[in-house]
Image: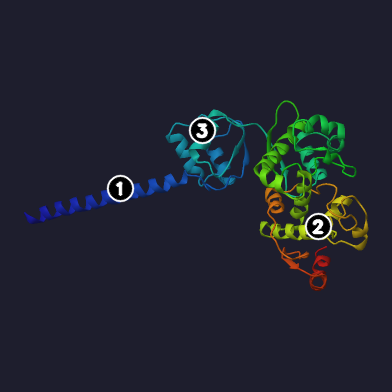
Amino acid sequence: MRLPKLRWRLAIIIAGIVIVLIAVSAWGFSKYYSGLLTPVNSRNGHEVTITVPSGSSLKDIGQLLQKKGLIRQAWAFEFYARWNHRNNYRAGKYVFTQKMSVSRMMDVLGKGEHPGIILLVDVRQDMWVSEIAGEMAKVSGLDKKEILKDLSDRTYIRKHYMSRYPFLTDEILAKGIDYPLEGYLSPGIYRFTKGKKPLTLDQMVDPMLSQTGQTLKRFSSQINANQLGSVHKILTLASLVEQEAPDAANRGKIAGVFYNRLKLKMKLQTDPSVAYGEQRRITNYTQKDLQTDTPFNTYTQPGLPVGPIGSPAANAIQAVLEPVPSDNLFFYARPNGKIYYSKTYAEQQAIIAKYQHEWAQKS
């Protein structure tokens, strides 16, 4: 009689263990599955445009999203959609990021919230207007030459921009300045939606000027107290700092050097001003380059250039408003970004003699 009881108890114990294992496995799978539905990278807001072709299945969409790195597993995406009866989606172009969960992506796909084709104009720090015009032409269908024609036209600038942006003063129209808005088109990535009509120049320029206005407003009290005396001169010096300093840590120091030289009425002698004056990017400067006189060449012209030599970022403007004080009058940048500061011409020449060959090798 005992044997059947033992077997019965053993069977109950085994059944209990099996149930526990199943429960643990189910809990583990549920946790794993839930993890597959979360954002791939909650800090990565980089936008990825995908096209969902007409007739695509949930499996097709899942595989596309996985291939683009927007979800972890295609099967989890498909299972989620089917389990939750979320299989109402539309073909077209969509913009997603790794910050979006599977649920959020299904919301977008289900509502058809695709914004059409997203057009991006990427204005990088230190870009020239002549280079920004090329980026504008790519997304607008406008001819680059026509864009530059308008951006060099004083009448056009007065009518379209100066009347609406008070920080655009008559200083931007000074003799020698080819593009009055140089230095005023704030760096950033600007998004536009492609509509039935092509983008206009004003549609692209306005948000850039608006961003500059916001930056200047942020520093308004410091701008009013600055020794340079005008926004135009501040942006001009900031553009020099932008192109000379590889990182924020050095921008305040380089701004301090420029102020020291201005105070002593020394020429600024900054290479990027030479390149801008010639409107060509130069890696290895020659004596001929340095001696080519333009309104922007700080080797031939005293003081600040007639205007900015590119688009300065906010931290370059801040560096000009908050320079690091020192006795340094010189600095030298190596191709690797390392910058050396010196107080005397002799120290500067010794540094140049030691490292100048690196620039020749780079070119």
Q: Earlier in the sequence, mark 2 or mark 1?
A: 1
Q: Do the residues under discs 2 and 1 have CB atoms within 8 angstroms?
A: no
Q: Which amino acid does label 1 sit on?
A: Ala
Image coordinates for residue 359, horizontal then vertical, percent: 81, 65
Q: What residue type is labelled 2?
A: Leu
Residue at numbered disc 3: 107
- Judging depth in this view, the residue of 313 and 220 nearest the camera is 220
Q: What element carries label 3?
A: helix
Q: Is mark 2 on a helix, strand or loop?
A: helix
Image coordinates for residue 101, horizontal then vertical, percent: 50, 41
* Residue 38 placement, left or right of 282: left
Rounded to the nearest angstrom, the CA distance separating label 2 from label 1 is: 76 Å
Residue at numbered disc 2: 262
Rounded to the nearest angstrom, the CA distance separating label 3 from label 1 is: 31 Å
Q: Quadrant of the C terminus?
A: bottom right
Q: Which of marks 2 and 3 is nearer the N terminus?
A: 3
Mark 2 residue crowding within 10 angstroms, few (<14) / some (14–19) / many (20+): some
Mark 1 residue crowding within 10 angstroms, few (<14) / some (14–19) / many (20+): few
Residue at numbered disc 1: 23
Q: Do the residues under discs 2 and 3 have CB atoms within 8 angstroms?
A: no
- Judging depth in this view, the residue of 44 and 265 nearest the camera is 265
Q: Earlier in the sequence, mark 3 or mark 1?
A: 1
Q: Is mark 1 on a helix, strand or loop?
A: helix
